[in-house]
Image: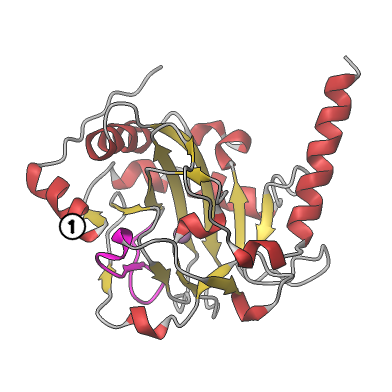
């Protein structure tokens, strides 16, 4: 069954996004819809869904199989929980992405970041594009949907307004440890001043451009902070002017090893058919 979108952005909201590079939406779906997904979401993390496939990683630690997990992330969670795809927020996210980027905007993927109760694990200031392939040009945005209220106490989104108009800034792995996959912009204190914090109730969402600097704080609450993120973009093109992301060239992470091994296994099984 296809869920129909119910959300239309106002011209003022579209203008705000173009100027500021982010948007806070009080309602992308109902609080009931997201509450109904919490158990499924928690199970994905409890069972480390996607670990063997290279879809489960620790953003902030060294990510060895026996290391304590600091900031777990699942790539492509809808592959492991198809319930996430047939939702009103997914339909509304697609509709607003087309309003903000144009009719050629399409779904690019999803990921999930869960902060356990009472964990000192901020997601440092970064631009999403710093993680991506530097040879491509992007016009993309992400829609961040918490599965409970997001507050300053549990780690709501914070943005540095207007930073989407800058190029991709220099980044480094968290703690300057090349074994860590998570990235932080160099000199984050320069951008943290004047930031816009966006607490939202369950059913709300925030939207950000792929170059908007953003951050979430530690989770100092007694419950988990669950965030589900959908990315949409127009067709990617090869860049006319080359660029290099030096921080990516230095990274040597366990996730890259698992991801490459899973890819090689898929190719072997495909070749055997
Ligand atoms: Ni991000």
Q: Residue furthest top?
A: 273
Rendered location of residue 241, percent (x, y): 48, 48
Query: Magenta stretch?
Result: 148-165
Q: Quadrant of the N terminus?
A: top left
Q: Residue furthest right?
A: 272
Identified at 53% across, 48% down, the residue is: 111
Instruction: Classify 10 Å Cα crowding around label 1: few (below 14), some (14-19), many (20 and above).
Output: some
**Disc 1 designates what residue?**
19
Rendered location of residue 235, percent (x, y): 43, 31
Q: Is residue 134 left or right of residue 265?
A: left
Q: Is residue 154 left or right of residue 59?
A: left
Rendered location of residue 195, percent (x, y): 28, 75
Q: Is there any visible trace of residue 190 in the rendered image? A: yes
- Location of residue 268 (image quadrant): top right
Q: From the viewer's perspective, is residue 188 above or below residue 99?
A: below
Identified at 26% across, 37% down, the residue is: 96
- Location of residue 191 (image quadrant): bottom left
The answer to whether mark 1 is within 8 Å of ligand 1 is no
Rendered location of residue 77, percent (x, y): 58, 42
**Which one is in front, 63 or 84?**
63
Identified at 35% across, 64% down, the residue is: 150
Q: What secondary structure prevails in the magenta region?
A: loop
Please check the rendered image and state whether residue 196 is part of the magenta-colored stretch, yes or no.
no
Per the image, label 1 sits on a secondary structure element best described as: helix
């Amino acid at each position: 069954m296809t869920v129909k979108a119910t959300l239309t952005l106002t011209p003022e909201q579209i203008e705000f996004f173009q100027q500021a590079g982010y948007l806070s939406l009080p309602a992308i779906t109902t609080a009931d819809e997201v509450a109904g997904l919490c158990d499924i979401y928690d199970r994905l993390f409890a069972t480390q869904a996607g670990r063997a496939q290279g879809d489960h990683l620790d953003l902030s630690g060294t990510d060895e199989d026996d290391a304590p997990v600091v900031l777990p992330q699942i790539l492509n969670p809808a592959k492991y929980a198809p319930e996430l795809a047939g939702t009103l927020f997914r339909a509304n996210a697609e509709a607003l992405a087309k309003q903000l980027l144009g009719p050629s905007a399409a779904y690019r993927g999803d990921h999930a970041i869960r902060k356990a109760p009472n964990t000192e694990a901020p997601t440092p200031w970064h631009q999403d594009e710093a993680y991506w392939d530097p040879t491509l040009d992007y016009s993309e945005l992400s829609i961040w949907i918490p599965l409970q209220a997001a507050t300053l106490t549990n780690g709501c989104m914070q943005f540095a307004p207007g930073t989407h108009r800058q190029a991709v800034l220099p980044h480094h792995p968290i703690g300057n440890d090349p074994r860590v996959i998570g990235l932080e912009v160099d000199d984050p204190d320069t951008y943290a001043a004047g930031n816009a914090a966006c607490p939202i109730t369950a059913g709300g969402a925030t939207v950000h451009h792929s170059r908007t600097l953003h951050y979430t704080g530690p989770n100092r609450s007694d419950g988990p902070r669950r965030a589900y993120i959908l990315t949409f973009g127009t067709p990617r093109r090869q860049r006319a002017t080359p660029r290099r992301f030096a921080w990516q060239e230095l990274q040597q992470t366990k996730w890259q090893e698992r991801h490459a091994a899973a890819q090689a296994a898929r190719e072997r099984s495909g070749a055997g058919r």
